[in-house]
Amino acid sequence: MSTSALLDIRGLRAGYGETEVLQGIDLTVSPGEIVAVLGSNGVGKSTLNRAMSGIVRARAGTIQFDGDAVENEKPSAIVARGLIHVPEGRRIFPNMTVSENLDLGSYRRATARRAANRDRIFSTFPRLFERRSQRAGTLSGGEQQMLAIGRGLMAEPKLIILDEPSLGLSPLLVEELFALIARINGEGMAVLLVEQNVVQSLEIANRAYILADGKFVMSGAAADIAADPALKRAYLGM
């Protein structure tokens, strides 16, 4: 593994039943980076996230995080190491309050600093502070996404995976969300941004990978990919 890599994936193959979805994935994320994985529906993004999180087992290849192999570890052990996945669709607990949802984020990690971390999340997301005693299911879509990210941050991640965070949000909220992700990264946190929103992801990412049919078809500096006309062919099929 590269000494500079926080996450280092080599030759990863994974799938379901007889179907192999990921067909030999290589990916790295260094400390302090925003790395984007971009692709349309059905190309393997969710399978990649689940493999990194231990929900789907790797059939071949290695996943090293912070210097240790994790491809055979349980999801709870991977969370305890500081690799935190904020899943697509938010997955909040609708009948619990905002504060209770946040506290669940520190269940496996950073329990001793729960109150201090909750205060930090409320400082980052003032709207969540205003709604701290409100049931999460009554929040707007944008507020629920803030809550999902805040819950992930409660675990003091070394790397946070954000799975389709802009999905279903209005253009104004999408702008706000991407500004927030850039701010979180500006405080030193590594971010793996898994998205369909190509343009805005490339604006804030350091590097990017384009996923198509279980393989990376492009990778490199985000600015270079954004300027490459092959992006339209690889990602949009144009």
Image (tube, rainbow, N blue to C red):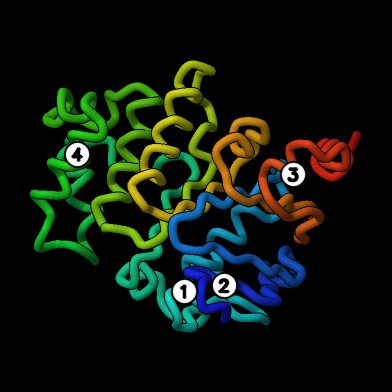
| Location of mark 3 (residue) | 224
Distance between the Cα atoms at labels 3 and 4?
Answer: 44 Å
Q: 220 or 199, which lies in front? A: 220
Identity of the residue drawn at 80% across and 41% down:
235
Query: On residue 65, which mark appears?
Result: 1
The tag earlier along the polypeptide, 2 or 4, is: 2
Q: CA distance from mark 4 to mark 1?
A: 32 Å
Circle 4 sits on which residue? 96
Quadrant where the N terminus sits is bottom right
Q: Secondary structure at mark 2?
A: strand
**Residue type, numbered disc 2:** Asp
- CB contact under 8 Å: marks 3 and 2: no
- Mark 1: amino acid: Phe
Q: Which mark is residue 8?
A: 2
Q: Earlier in the sequence, mark 1 or mark 3?
A: 1
Q: Residues within 10 Å of mark 3 (few under 14, many from 20)?
A: some
Q: Position of residue 39 (x, y in %)?
A: 71, 45
Mark 2 and mark 1 residues within 8 Å of each other at the beta carbon: yes
